[in-house]
Structure formats: structure tokens, C-alpha cells
Image (cartoon, rainbow, N blue to C red):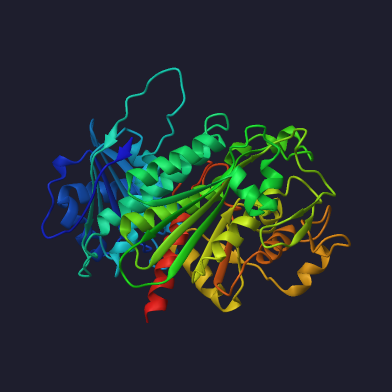
Amino acid sequence: MAVKNCRVSSLREQPNLESFDGILILLPAQTTPNSDSRNDLKAILGDDLVEAAMSLLKKTGKKAKPSDRITWDLDAEKRLSILWISKDAKAFQILTDCRKAAGDLLANKAKKLAVFCSGFEQDASILENAFAALYSHSYHFKKYGSKVETEEDLATVDLISNSNTPIPEGAGSSWLALNTEQSFVRDLVTRAGNDLTPKVYCDEVMSWAKSENISAEKFSYDQLKDMGAGAFIAVAQGSTHKQSAIIKLTHDSGKPGPKICYVGKGVTFDTGGNNLKPATSMFGMEGDMAGSAVALASFRLAVKENWSGHHSCYLAISDNLIGDLAYKPNDVITALNQKTIEIVHTDAEGRMLLADTLCLASREKPDLILDYASLTGACIRALGDGYSGVFCNRSEWNDSLIQAGMTSGERVWPFPLDEDYGESLKSDVADIKQCRLTGGADHIEAAYFLRQFLEGDCLWVHVDLAASHRPGGLAHVASDVTGFGVRFTQEFVSGFIMNSQS
């Protein structure tokens, strides 16, 4: 199923529930349902259904405390759910609770949904979280399979507020755009490596850019080699097809604002190269292009919503294979900025691809570069898979990064980038080592490595996507592929744009 439209309105009189086959009601949690709660419910359901709800609540032994929910069928074709949310809950918890409620509601394949929100000071964020959960739960990846499945649409989700605070104009279409792009990430990351090859990926991006009248430039393998992008070429040369490329997309909103660049690692399959991965680590490496998917989706959202300023996107698209020409440990290569790199481990290919791509991007002198990569296992070991790591060359922005994660529900945590982390990357034969073989804090050292290839003095944020894949899903997303990053980016970039204009 897919959501085609999102309508936002205010509750002015008791609604006609007959037009919906799935109804979700969101109320503030309390120890016992008080008169305000009953009045809110009566405004939506009427006296008879309120009494039925209170009776069911009593039977289940629940007390309308945070995260409590009840669901029942009003008839064979109509299902009703009530979810109580703590007024102090963070977005991550609200998204998680709404995902569970969405699962209850959609279990009977409801297609016409309504969400009623009542009793909160700010309904907009609550309604958006509920919509995100419904949208995510209705998503299914259906590209492969022997049977052709008919796409069923949740044509419209009505989001109805009972608050006196008006919902921003155009909120429904913006929420739909945001959640569409997160699902776009999930689609890309789920695609098989023999389907989404470097050539196919590049062709599809260029085709989309042409269809949207977006300025696009493709730096081919041969062009990059001639340019001296040795770090990128070292990885790409392992493939006999030589179809790897860097794609640059640009969009100017026509509105004053900062120059913002999104950069992503797009390894369509990662064998580890000559340092071949074991089977347990290689399985799932078709998703090693998650960073590029987030960068592309964020750029697409900036285009759709016409965010202020100038936006560009650089996608480092390649695979990491074995072969006669594949790069090897102890090779010394020269990057685009003329720095030499001693190769230590060929499975640290992401930082190689990003090194030259970041150099290219930074030469445009943007105000902000955000790069995304499923880069290190060390970041997962440090944080688990419920957060992603962030690294910033200006520590005064760390609080803003944390806040953007909390507000969006895609939580991040900053790590240090002090100079002494570079001690382990000193080389006897080159300017810098690619990594070390054992020990250390590889997620931090990888970020330190990447910083050496930035030119100029722009704000730089590196996102190590520890939460891009999580068994059982994350927050509002029920699938293992989470699409993590677009919500966080939307929140952080909107704050950055506002800050730059103040």
C-alpha cells in the first residue's frame, strides 16, 4: 500500500466517522481518564462509543498511562484505536508508540484512515509522527517476486487537530514529501546488488535529474582518473566494467540562503576487496550504498520543498570487488588534493571514495557539507544500532546536532575529532595511513581521515549511519532497512538555514 495524499484540518464539530474504515485517536496520558479526556473523546466519538472505550479500557486493566493503547472493531469493516501519549515524550518514543498503533489499525487492511489529535499544546508534531508511522507501516518493497502484486493505496490520510494552535499551511504536503523520500531510501537500500549496479544507479539518477530539469554532471571513471582522483580510482579499478562515477546535482531555489552540499557513499556491493569479507559480514553488503541514498533523498526533498539557498549533491558510486587490478594493502596512492595515502585494509573503501568526493564538493566553497556513509562497524559497537554517530569540525554545533536528532526522532550522538586521534594514522611512506589494522576508535579515526581532504573552511558534518539497518526496525519504521537520515537532515538543515538568515 502507498499513501497518495495527506489532508490536515481542525475539528470544529463531531466528525462523520462513516467515511473512514480506520480511526486512530491520540490523547495525553494520565493515571486515570479524567473529564477532559472523556470530553475530548465525546467530541470525536459521541457518548455511546466513549462508554464502550472506557469499558474496554477497564477490561484490559489499562489506565490510559503513557504508551497504553486499545483497539477494537466497531463492525466488520471499521477498526478504532486509541493511543495515550505522555506530554513529555520525545519524538522517538512517540514514533515508536504510533508504529505499534498503526500496526493494530492496519492489520485489517484499512484504506481510508483518520487520525484525531486532542489535548496537546502542539498537535502538529504529534500528527506528523502518527502520519509517519502510518505511511511507514503501509510501505512494502515489491520489486522482486514471481507473482505480480496489485498495489493497494491508502488514498488519503486525514489528520485532524482539536488544538487552538493552527497547523502550518501546506503541512500535509510537506509531511508527505518527507515520508516519501524516507521510503525512497528504503527502496534503494533494499535493491539487490545485481540490480542496482553502478551503471544502473548512475543512469537512474541522471534520468531523474533530466526529468526534473535538475543540473547534473557525471564524472566518469576515465575523467576521474585524468583528474587525479586516485583515492576513488583505487577502489573503482577492482571492477572490470569501469562504470564507477561521481555524480553532481545542483539546484538553486531562487531564494536567498546558504550553499548546502549533501555527499554520500554509494558502494552498490562491498566484497571487502583483497581483504575479502567472511560470508557473515558480506551478506547484506548490497546496502552499503545507504549513505548515497540518504544524500540523494535529502537533495530531492530540498528540490521538492524548494528550501532556501543553493543545494548540491555529490554521489560517490562504485562497487568494491576483487580482481587483478584491485588495490592492495601497502599500495600508496595519490588523492585529488595531492595527499598520498598508505593503504592498510581494502575493506576501508568508503573513506577512500569519500576522500576525493569531499575534496570535489569542498572546492565549491559551500557553507555546509553533510556527508553520509554506512562507514564503520566501530560506530555500531560504540552506539548500538539505535543511534547514528555524527562528527563535526566545529564542536559548537554539537548541541544543534543532538537537538535535531531528538526533534526528528532519528537520534544522533557526536564524537570528538581532536588532533591526537591522527597519531595512529601517521605513515612512514605516505602523508597519511588509510586506517590501522587493529584496535583504536575506527569511527573517529575514519572521520579524522576524511577531514584531511576538505578544502576551505566550511562547516562539515559527517554522519556514520550506524542505524541504517536494525533488525525489527527503528522508531516508526518496522522494516530492518530504516531509511535513517532524511528526517534528521530536514530538521538540522531547516535550523541551519534559519540561523544563516538571522
Question: On the rendered image, what quadrant is the N terminus found in?
Answer: top left
Residue 184 at least partly seen: yes
- Estimate the x, y position of residue 279 in percent, counting from the top left: 73, 32
Question: On the rendered image, what quadrant is the C terminus found in?
Answer: bottom left
Q: Residue at x 43, y 50 (%)?
A: 216
- Farthest top residue in view: 146
Q: Residue at x 32, y 29 (%)?
A: 151
Quadrant in which residue 287 is drawn? top right
| Vertical comparison of 16 with 433: above or below | above
| Vertical comparison of 487 with 219: above or below | below
| 130 vs 343, nearest the viewer | 343
Q: Is residue 43 left or right of residue 97?
A: left
- Farthest front residue in view: 226
- Estimate the x, y position of residue 248 in percent, counting from the top left: 48, 53
Quadrant in which residue 208 is drawn? top left
Q: Is residue 157 left or right of residue 135?
A: left
- Estimate the x, y position of residue 236 in percent, counting from the top left: 66, 42
| Vertical comparison of 351 with 424: above or below | above
Q: Residue at x 38, y 67 (%)?
A: 87
Quadrant in which residue 257 is drawn? bottom left
- Farthest right residue in view: 428
| 106 vs 257, nearest the viewer | 257
Residue 91 at least partly seen: no
